[in-house]
Image (cartoon, grey):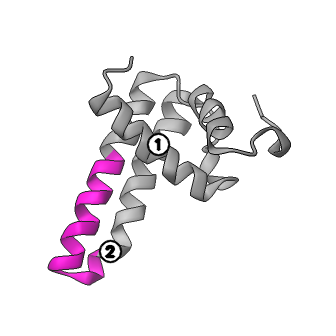
């Protein structure tokens, strides 16, 4: 299901679309794991080895895109909405870990 850009003017609208693209539990957890590793690596690289900062998005998106292509069988929204997708990945991680959402 593809939503028109005109119907996603707010982050709330995008979030509703984003959730329709993340119904598979394995895909959701692939996003959570990738996001947490990416954040951890980003923090580590800031204090110990700045060269590792390049691997942070590769690992984060590697997990997420694998979840989409292998388990969810759809195209990641990152390709069309990179910033909103990043924010939604962070929100998905928070909601999954702390809000006891299914």
> Which one is earlier in the sequence, the residue at label 1 or at label 2?
2
Labels 1 & 2 near each other (Cβ < 8 A): no
From the viewer's perspective, is the residue at label 1 or at label 2 nearer?
2
**Residue at 60% of width from left, 44% of height from top?**
76
Q: Which residue is mark 2?
A: 53
Q: Residue furthest bottom?
A: 50
Q: CA distance from mark 1 to mark 2?
A: 21 Å
The quarter of the rendered structure image containing the N terminus is: top right
Residue 17 rendering spot, x and y as whole percentages: 66, 32
**Does residue 44 appear left or right of residue 86 in this picture?**
left
- At label 2, counting other C-alpha atoms closer than 10 Å, the crowd grade (few under 14, some 14-19, many 20 or more) is some
The quarter of the rendered structure image containing the C terminus is: top left
Confirm whether the magenta stretch covers residue 40: yes
- At label 1, counting other C-alpha atoms closer than 10 Å, the crowd grade (few under 14, some 14-19, many 20 or more) is some
Residue 95 rendering spot, x and y as whole percentages: 37, 32
Magenta residues, as a range?
Answer: 34-52
**Does residue 34 appear left or right of residue 1 in this picture?**
left
Q: Which mark is residue 1?
A: none
Residue 31 rendering spot, x and y as whole percentages: 40, 41
Q: Secondary structure at mark 2?
A: helix
Q: Nearer the viewer, residue 75 or 92?
A: 92
Q: Residue furthest left?
A: 48
Q: Residue furthest top?
A: 102
Q: Which residue is mark 1?
A: 66
Q: Secondary structure at mark 1?
A: helix
**Residue at 19% of width from left, 81% of height from top?**
49
**Residue at 69% of width from left, 44% of height from top?**
10
Majority secondary structure in the magenta region: helix
Confirm whether the magenta stretch covers residue 61: no
**Does residue 6 appear left or right of residue 40 in this picture?**
right
**Residue at 30% of width from left, 42% of height from top?**
33
Residue 62 in the image: above or below residue 41: above
């Amino acid at each position: 299901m593809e939503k028109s850009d005109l119907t996603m003017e707010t982050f709330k609208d995008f979030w509703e679309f984003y959730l329709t693209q993340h119904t598979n539990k394995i895909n959701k957890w692939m996003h959570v794991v990738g996001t947490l590793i990416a954040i951890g690596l980003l923090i580590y690289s800031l204090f110990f080895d700045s060269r590792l900062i390049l691997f942070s998005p590769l690992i984060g998106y590697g997990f997420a895109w694998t979840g989409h292509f292998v388990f969810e069988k759809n195209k990641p929204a990152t390709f069309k909405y990179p910033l909103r997708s990043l924010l939604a990945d962070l929100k998905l991680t928070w909601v999954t870990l702390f809000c006891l959402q299914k």
